[in-house]
């Protein structure tokens, strides 16, 4: 089954794009975006944005790759207008987080073609942070975890339950710190996969408590600090028996 609300599967994820995944998930490596800095070139959330169902949007440079990789699964790959550039905020054109009916993004950075499609499906919530998806982990239609204050405040204004954390403990060499959103992704409706161990994070205990309050468990993959690989982007669930 295709996932109707991006990032929020209703059943066990069986197909995803990203740099890590729980056991049993068919993982498609992200396209290499050569215009990005070396450490970010394989970050899925900088070069692919699901918009619901069987449609995804990616930069022109990645269309051929994703058509070949996702076409066999029935996906329609929509070409955006720009390729990400090497410097912020031009590297964030496809970095959007969706929580329920809301799409949180910086409209000054977002690819125009992507923004037009999102406006047709979601209520756009403007935030200052260009790295919207990197900075946030949506865990339900009504809740998310973020280290970014502009996303946190915007979420609260829209009635979402948000947990404000610190990214300290998330690894992304050669940078001093990565993003928690980029080290996570929902493995099913009630499980947040974490690419590492939450106890290695300063906010780890708070994150676990918040997840538990929402009936969500953390699937921690490994014992090292969470590693930001550019998000796990779930695309299909077990109903399709892939």
Image (cartoon, rainbow, N blue to C red):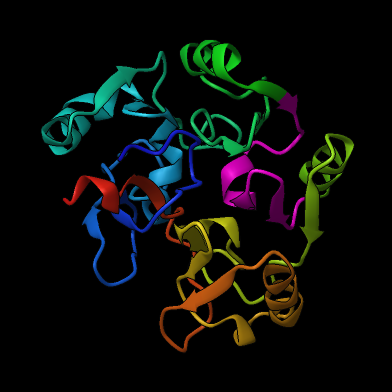
Counting from the top left corner in percent of width and height, residue 85 is at 45, 31
Q: Residue at x 58, y 44 (%)?
A: 133
Vertical position of residue 167 compared to residue 125: above or below: below
Number of marks in picture: 0
Q: Is residue 145 magenta?
A: yes
Q: Residue at x 65, y 68 (%)?
A: 215
Vertical position of residue 207 compared to residue 77: above or below: below
Residue 88 vs residue 208, the one in the foreground: 208
Magenta region: 125-148
Quarter of the rendering occupied by the N terminus: top left
Vertical position of residue 186 compared to residue 215: above or below: above
Counting from the top left corner in percent of width and height, residue 80 is at 39, 17
Q: Report whether 55 appears left or right of 122.
A: left
Residue 237 vs residue 157, the one in the foreground: 237
Q: Residue at x 51, y 46 (%)?
A: 8
Q: Is residue 173 magenta?
A: no
Counting from the top left corner in percent of width and height, residue 72 is at 10, 34
Q: Name the image quarter holding residue 130.
A: top right
Residue at the extreme front: 239
Q: Report whether 143 appears left or right of 17.
A: right
Counting from the top left corner in percent of width and height, residue 56 is at 36, 28
Residue 103 vs residue 151, the one in the foreground: 103
Vertical position of residue 224 compared to residue 102: above or below: below
Q: Report whether 174 appears left or right of 207.
A: left
Q: Residue at x 45, y 43 (%)?
A: 45
């Amino acid at each position: 089954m295709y996932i109707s609300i991006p990032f929020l599967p209703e059943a066990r994820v069986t197909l995803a794009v990203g740099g890590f995944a729980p056991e049993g998930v068919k993982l498609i490596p992200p396209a290499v975006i050569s215009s990005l800095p070396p450490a970010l070139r394989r970050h899925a959330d900088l070069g692919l944005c699901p918009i619901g169902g069987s449609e995804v949007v990616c930069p022109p440079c990645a269309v051929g790759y994703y058509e070949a990789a996702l076409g066999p699964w029935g996906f329609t790959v929509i070409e955006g207008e720009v390729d990400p550039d090497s410097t912020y905020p031009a590297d964030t054109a496809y970095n959007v987080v969706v929580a329920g009916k809301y799409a949180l993004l910086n409209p000054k950075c977002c690819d125009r073609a992507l923004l037009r499609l999102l406006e047709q499906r979601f209520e756009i919530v403007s935030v200052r942070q260009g790295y919207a998806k990197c900075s946030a982990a949506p865990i339900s239609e009504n809740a998310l975890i973020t280290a970014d204050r502009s996303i946190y405040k915007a979420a609260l204004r829209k009635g979402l339950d948000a947990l404000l954390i610190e990214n300290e403990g998330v690894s992304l060499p050669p940078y001093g710190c990565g993003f928690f959103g980029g080290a996570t992704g929902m493995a099913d409706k009630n499980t947040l996969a974490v690419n590492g161990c939450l106890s290695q994070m300063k906010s780890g205990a708070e994150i676990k408590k918040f997840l538990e309050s929402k009936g969500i468990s953390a699937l921690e993959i490994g014992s090292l600090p969470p590693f930001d690989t550019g998000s796990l982007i779930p695309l299909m669930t077990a109903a399709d028996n892939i």
